[in-house]
Every structure is written in structure tokens, then in C-alpha cells.
Amino acid sequence: MWSLKIWLMGALVTAPGVASAAEVAVSDSAGLLAAIAAAEAGDTITLAAGTYVIQQPKIACNSEGTAQAPIVVRAASPGEVLLKMDTLEGFHVRGAFWRFEGLDVEGTCADDSACEHAFHVTGAAHGVQIRGSRMHGFNAMIKGNGEPIGPGNSYVWPNDVEILYNEFFNAAPRNTSNPVTFIDVVGGQRWVLRGNFIHDHAKGGGNNISYAAFLKGHSKDGLIERNLVVCELLHSGQVRLGLSLGGGGTSPDSICEDGACKPEHERGTIRNNLIVNCPADVGIYVNAGADSVIAHNTIYNSAGIDMRFPETSGVVQNNLLSGKIRDRDGASSTKLGNLSELSLADFAAWFVAPADFDFELKDGAALVDQAAPLVSVKDDYCGNLRDDGAPDIGAIEYDGEGCAGGIPAAEATTTGDPSTSGDPSTSGDPSTGAESSTSAESSTSSGSSSGSSSGSTGGDPSTSGSDETAGATGSASAGGSASETASGGQEADEDGCACSSASGAGWGAGGLLVLASLGLRRRRVAVYTSSPVMAATPAAPSASADVPAARRRASSRRSRSASASSGWAPSSRS
């Protein structure tokens, strides 16, 4: 039996039209399921420490919260609640304004194809927030897509969803031919992916191609910022891309916004991210992304940034990266103020330990105060304002007030401009590809080493809505951001879900493990040796516990004394 609802102050005063909110404490699986089934707007469901075994195919979150009175599901003690799920998906959220905080959701299926989603956000599930949690043991940890629940069976997509300060990883490559993308969003508007630690997103079966996260399916106004992506941390190999607008493309048109999958995304922004150790492919990939802003990212040990296909346009500005910035297969973008094609030796000369995502400066002459301000980028990876009139190139502003990399830490408030629109200061003819940086990047549409369009796609990235591309190197499937139809093309399902058709065997032993939701701002000398999640959950099988001491936050001290002649040379990566 689950515990009785505890009514605050005897009779809680609520806004008109909002049911009386309750604090619901649960301590076992039956109580959790009953509380979620009975949830009303304003309820807070708090899980006591322990292991929760769920024996049903999914947890249906159908009740409706409101913006003023969301339904909250949270752990009482971060690091002391464990939910293990031997099922196709965990929480299926169809109601609006649910919030999940401090939950560690682990998939435990013996067959990797049988554990797809920790959270599946569909239809009219607007305003959902997933924060301070950890997910592992799934193929697409968070899946978002539309459902035909509107008038005349028209599709409705979840809007204004926030994915904040979570950790995503798998302890080993997924042995599946199903799509493997930890945050996989098809349709929807104004999704925000902020401050997440995404690592070891590897697909061991099928075409071996995976992504950290993407927004596609003609989604709009998405914001991807302040995330740490480490493609190879616990294990290596396969083809692992970083962040994307458009992913591998989507089909059929019926599952996409406006009944058309092109462009795959409109007015999307990818800014202030650290992307590390993605050697087999690009760190950022834009596939049919119209009016995109790719700004102030730092990308280490990667093939670079690909802008691809005629629908792709926008600005690529103030990024710091190994690898090239390329317009391919008809894409056109304005490139300004980037430092590209840096060698790993350049990074080693400029930063303390970039392979360990420690970007404390050793020599900042080439990047400090070298960027032109962008209206749409007011802060940096650390939440530190870029307010001195001369921003630094890359994700971090080295003014002594922020951090120098490390694992993202949550803040009570954010100082960034939520706008995902382009910066008017970068206007101009996008077809020129004009570049004011010192890099040797090309502004022409080219296939580079991966060839122009691939043989299998004929220039069209969509094949039955596959979630995957081969990215810049073309090392997996047909030459550079070429799509695959994975196990029959899961994205072609009528609800746009990438789920396998395999039926789950019901819920096995389950446990929710909590990632601490940090309230501390990253300071100049904030130092720790492991993930915030792992610090709270030492017994958990998380990758972060293995992060060496070198991967610490360090002083964001400037180093201006060294000459810029320690400069870069074009990378050997083609």
C-alpha cells in the first residue's frame, strides 16, 4: 500500500481551476505506480531511498499538470533510489507539465533491442522537464515524437520540453541494429537540452552509427547548450557523432511537423558546448537545418562541423575545433571568427588537459578576446556572462569568473538568452561562406574526404526515417552523413517512435538511482574528481566514477603571456 496523501496546512490554497496539491510519499513499487496513476496537478511524489521493482510494460503518466502546478516525481535522497527496468520503455509521458528530478533509470534487458527508452514523451506532453537524473541501459534514453490525437487524427507534438543537467551513458556498446541516440526528438517546438553530460553513446550492431543527441522531424526553435559530450570515455570504436540538428533524416512526412520532414529543423541553436573525443566523425552535424546558429562550441579530437543539404543555412561563428567546417551537398552557411583545423598538438599547447575535458588555459593568445560579439550568445559553457565586449573563441569565456570545463553543474538560474534566433550581426550573404577567422576552413560545398553525397542515399538523408548517419568520414554507411534503414526503419512507425517492434517481457527488477541535482554555480576554482551523479551515488555502475582526477574543474585563469606563434597547423584529418 502506498502512503496517504499529506495535505499541507490542512487545506492547500490553489489557483482557480487547479486541484488541491498533495505531497505523496512512496516507499515501494506499488505505491509509486498508484501515486502516478492518481496524480493531479500540483502533486509532488517523493520516492524514499530503496529499490523499486516495476512489473508492468511501462509507467503511464497521463494526468495533466499545469505550468503553475506541475506534477513532480522526485527522489527524497539523491543517490539512494534505484529503478531498474526490464522493458521496452520506462516512463511514457502523455500528460502536460510533468517534472522528473533526481532519478536514475537503468535498463536491464538481456537483449539490448528490448530496452529502448527511459522516458518517452509524446503527443500533448507539453512543458515536461527531466532534470538532475541519470539514464543508462537504453538505446534512446529520451524519445520525443508526435501522436495522431488531434482533430481528424492529426498529429500533435510535445512542445517546450526541457532536458537539464542529466547524465546519459552506456557501459558498453549496444548490441542492436535499432537506432542509438540518447536524446532522440522527432518534431516539437522549443525543446531545450542544457547542461547534460552525454558519453559513450555507441552502437555495436547494424551500421555502428550513433549520436549523442538530435532534434529532427521538422522540429523548430530548439536550443542545445552547455552540454559536455564525450563520445569515447569508457569504451571506444564504432562511429559516434556528437550533437545534431536533423540527425539522419526522417520519413514519412506524416510524422513530421507541418506534414513535411524538410527542413528537418528550423531556427535551431547549438552553442557553448564542449564536444570531446569523437574521432570517427563530426562533433556537430546539421542535416537540412534552416536558419541554424552554430556558435561558440569547443570541439576536440573530431572531424569538425558538417552543414549538409540544400535546406541547410545559417551562421557558424566563433567555434574552436579540430577538423573542418564544411558546407556539403548544397548547404550554405556564413562562417565567421572560427578557429578550425587545429591539431591535437595545438590543443595541448593551449590547454591543460583537453582530452580529459579540462580546458584551463596555458596559452590563450589565439582565442582570448578574439571573437566578435553575438547577440544570441550572452554567456558561456559555465553560465558566465560574455560581457567584456570582446568574447573569447570557443565555449568558455576566460575572464576569471567561470569554470574551465569539467562536468556541467546546475545553476538556480541561467543568464543566457533563451532566444534561438540568429544573430543579426552575422547577417550577410550566406552563400559566400566568408570567414574572418585565422582558420583554413573551406566555405565551399564539398564532400571532402567522405565524398559528396553517398551512393546509398542519392543525396537524400532519409531512408525510412532512420535516425543515423555516417557523418563526415563516411566510415560506416556510404560516405558521409548517409542514412541507414535500421531494422526496417523504426521512424516509419505511425507514431514516429523509434521503438523496436519486439514486445517487452514486462517489468523486471527495477531501481531508480539518483543523480544529484546540483544547485552550485561552477566557480573559478570548483574542483571535483567525478560526475555530480557519481558523487552522490558511489555504488552505481556509472562511467563517471572512473573519470580520473585530471578531469577536474580548474581555475579559468587567462594566459596571455605566450605568443600566438604557438599557433595551429591544419590537422592531418581529411
Image (cartoon, rainbow, N blue to C red):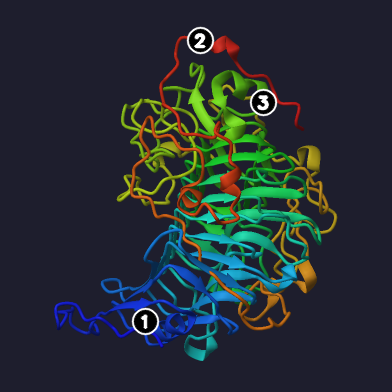
**Is residue 44 rendered to the left or right of residue 198?**
left
- Disc ID at residue 64: 1
* 365 to 441, vertically: above or below: above
Quadrant for the N terminus, please: bottom left
Q: Residue at x 44, y 13 (%)?
A: 560
- Taking depth in this image into account, of 226 and 150 the one nearest to the observer is 226
| Dot 1 amino acid type | Glu
Q: Residue at x 41, y 30 (%)?
A: 397
**Is residue 119 rendered to the left or right of residue 164?**
right
Where in the figure is residue 553, as x and y percent of width and height? 46, 33
Q: Earlier in the sequence, mark 2 or mark 1?
A: 1
Mark 1 in CB contact with mark 3 (< 8 angstroms): no
Q: Earlier in the sequence, mark 2 or mark 3?
A: 3
Where in the figure is residue 154, as x and y percent of width and height? 53, 84
| Dot 2 amino acid type | Ala
Where in the figure is residue 252, as x and y percent of width and height? 67, 74
- Taking depth in this image into account, of 369 and 212 the one nearest to the observer is 212
| Dot 3 amino acid type | Leu
Q: Rounded to the nearest whole Å, what is the CA distance between mark 2 and mark 3?
A: 18 Å
Q: Secondary structure at mark 1?
A: loop
Q: Residues within 10 Å of mark 2 (few under 14, many from 20)?
A: some
Q: Residue furthest bottom?
A: 152
- Disc ID at residue 344: 3
Which residue bears the numbered disc 2?
562
